Structures are given as structure tokens and as C-alpha cells.
Image: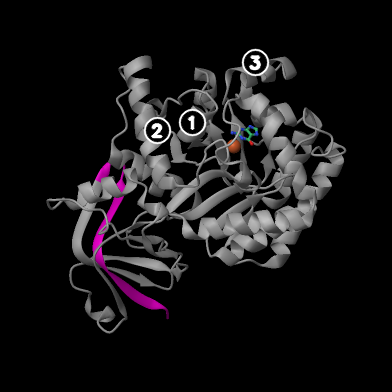
Amino acid sequence: MNDFALKGNILHTAKMGELEIFPDAYLICADGICQGVFYEPPGQYAGIPVTDYSGLLIIPGMTDLHIHAPQFACRGTGMNAELLDWLNTRVFPEEIRFADMDYAARAYQIFADQMRKSATTRAVIFGTTHRNATLLLADLMEASGLVSYIGKVNMDRNAPEDLLESSADAAASDTRAFIRDVINKRYARTKPILTPRFIPCCGDALLFQLSKIRQEFDLPVQSHLSENPAEVELVKTLEPDAEFYGDCYDKYGLFGGESGTIMAHCVYSSDAEIRRMKENGVRIAHCPNSNTNLSSGIAPIRKYIHLGLRVGLGSDVAGGQTESMFRAIADAVQASKIYWRYINHHDKPLTFAESFYLATKGGGSFFGNVGSFETGYEFDALVIDDSKLPCPRPLSLADRLERAVYLGLDQTSITAKYARGLKIL
Ligand code: GUN
Ligand code: FE
């Protein structure tokens, strides 16, 4: 048995918007599973090793529901374009480089190292169309200790030839081989996810093939949805018979379902699209940093929460300039305030505790019981040392957490990090 306890100031949001605070308490882990928070460890845990983080903040690990590993080198560059131009001028030329395994090895090592140091314990990740490079990414993420889903990207139209697969059949056979490769590796922490890039890059024949693969392997799906006005118009031109953008995925059983579907963005989803997302249990990866950088807009997250849709946060590197989930939490609050002020004053801004929930339990639920310190939850935890931030007066624990997030202490001050009970930092 691998049982241990962490001692410190414990904070989490087991319920949306409700920050629970346990000053100077014990957080107990047995075999990777959280046994709860206690002021005195119960008798059966009397002798377990305790790591003393007294005075520090102990919070759940973060889930990044949407990130592109091959775009890590593009962070913070080319940010004057909107989505479709940005893809053509920055993203596709970078992703083409991943045909070269030496380049892929260098780039993905940088990515995996950074993810290990980040606040993220769970990630849902896009690779490129390249099967071998994406398998290497899976190897490196497994070694990082994070728990992740990795997708080999599928695309067969509207991109440079060097990035496209030669046919829908070729894409499908490569995707099948990638999935088999991942299964054969018997990773403990890494799983495959079906990844059609987005409708402008995926024709009907390809989506049909992916629907068959989904049935065969019972896989979750990740993609993009209603991110940018020109993109939404392009989809209408390409797929005039679809009821709405998301219907193009739904026609092929790639929009919801038991094994789960994550759609990034949903900035311009129509009422009909929203209704279908709700009916099908589609999850939304809200990526406010990317939506600002690419002038995409602001997703109506208060409305989605109100309607009971499942929402988590994504960094969307490199639309987003950073993998920092602390930044994503602050950005989600700030974007919601602009939305409320300028777009719809009925949609109240997100509170800090609501946004914190989205980054932890909201997104974490894609992985099961993940994202809080409730008993039975998988043990993902961060220890944050905010002692180097000077303040002339004592702060409450709630203020200390909010300050640590807004000031980006995940970049400098993670003292320890645990994913599914394993100490990875
Ligand atoms: N839509 C299709 N591909 C991409 C991508 O790589 N990033 C973002 N933000 N949107 C996309
Ligand atoms: Fe994206």
C-alpha cells in the first residue's frame, strides 16, 4: 500500500462556486485515491508518512481540456491574425515539421518537460497528423507522470498537402494503427482520443471512417466547434445540408456519447447547437486566452453553466500563449466580466471560485472522479508556496489562493505536484 498524508492549508471546490477551506489539515492518499481531509488523521492512518507543508496552500491539480502539443514553439508569436489566417501562416507550417522525428523529439521533450512543471495534472492533447511523432508524444507524456489523452490529428482537406493525409482511407488506417500502437504500449496514464481537426479540414468520407473507428474502439472524441465567424461561415459553405456546425459531427456519431466528446470554444453556437450539445452530453473546453488572442470572441459560459452543460477550461496553446491553467482561471473570470458588461448584462460574471471549479472538477470529470479532495477522488494535488509574495498584513486563505492564481504562481512556486497519487514534482 502506498499511503501518505500531506499537511497544510487545504482548499478545493467540491461544488460549483463553493470554495471550501481547511486550515492546517491533513489530506490523506491511499493507493492513488483521496481518503478525505481531516484535522486529526483517523486511527487506521495513525502511522502513515506525513509530508509537512504547513503554511503552504494545497489545492487540486488542474485539467487542461484542450491543448496542441506541436504548437508549443508558436506560443506568443503571430498573434495579429484571426483563426483561418493564423492556421495557414503559423500553425500548419509548424505542424508540417513533425514529419521529421528529430524535430518532433526535441519539440515534444520541451513540451512534456513544461507540462510536468505546470499546474496541470490531466490534459487532453492534440498531436499532428503524423502517427510516429504522435506516438512519441504519448511516450513522453506517459513518462511525465501526467494523466492524458493524446490524439493523432485527422485532416484530409483545406490545408497544405504536406500535412494532409492522402485519402480518408489512408487517414483511417493510420489512426487505427496509432490507436493499436497506444493500446499495445500498455501505458498506465495515457490513452488515445479520436481527433478530427475541425470540419473545414475533415470531409464526409473521413468522418464516416472515424465513426467506424469510434464504434470499434469505443473512444472519446475531441475537436473544435464554432470558434470564429469566418470559420462558421466556411462550414456553412462546405456542408450546406447540416443543420448547424455541430450537426456535421453528430451525423457521424462524433458529438457526445458514453465515451465522451470535448468540443473546444463554442463561441458562436446557435440555440439548436447548444440544445444538441446538452442532449448529447457534449463537453465544452472554454479557452478564453485563445479566444482573445485570435479575436474570436467570448463564449457565453454563464449561459452554458445555467443550462447545465459540462464545461472545463483549456489553454489551447498556441492560440493561447501559455499552458498556465492559473492564467486560464483568471482569463475566464475576466472574459465573463466583459461579456456581462458589453454583451449581456443578464449573464453575471464568473466568480473566482466558479472559474477555479471549471479548471479542477469541471474539466476533471472527463477523467472520472478527478478535481477535488472528496473521498474516493483520484489524488491530484498541487502544493503552492506563496510566501515569497510580500504583503504588509496577513491575508485570508481565500485571498491567498486568489492572489496566487491571478499572479501566476504556477510559473514559479509549485513546491510539489501529485498526479493520481504519484509525486511528479
Ligand atoms: N481549429 C482548427 N485547428 C485549430 C487549432 O490548431 N487551434 C485553434 N485554436 N483552432 C483550431
Ligand atoms: Fe485548439
Is residue 21 part of the magenta span, yes or no? no
Using the image, determine if residue 19 lies above or below residue 309: below
- Residue 271 vs residue 101: left or right? left
Residue 146, position as x, y percentages in the image:
52, 60
Helix, strand, or loop for circle 2?
loop
Q: Nearer the viewer, residue 331 or 10?
A: 331
Which comes before the other along the chain, label 2 or label 3?
3
Q: Residues within 10 Å of mark 2 (few under 14, many from 20)?
A: few
Q: Which residue is mark 3?
A: 233
Work out whether residue 197 can be spotted: no
Ligand 2 position by quadrant:
top right
Q: Nearer the viewer, residue 384 or 29?
A: 384
Q: Residue at x 60, y 57 (%)?
A: 110
Which comes before the other along the chain, label 1 or label 3?
3
Q: Which residue is mark 1?
A: 278
Residue 225, position as x, y percentages in the image:
59, 29
Q: CA distance from mark 2 to mark 3?
A: 27 Å
Q: Mark 1: which amino acid?
A: Lys
The range drawn in magenta is 1-18
Using the image, determine if residue 267 lies above or below residue 356: above
The secondary structure that dominates the magenta segment is strand
Q: Which residue is mark 2?
A: 308
Work out whether residue 380 can be spotted: yes
Q: Mark 1 and 2 residues: CB-CB less than 8 Å, in contact?
A: yes
Helix, strand, or loop for circle 3?
helix
Which comes before the other along the chain, label 1 or label 2?
1
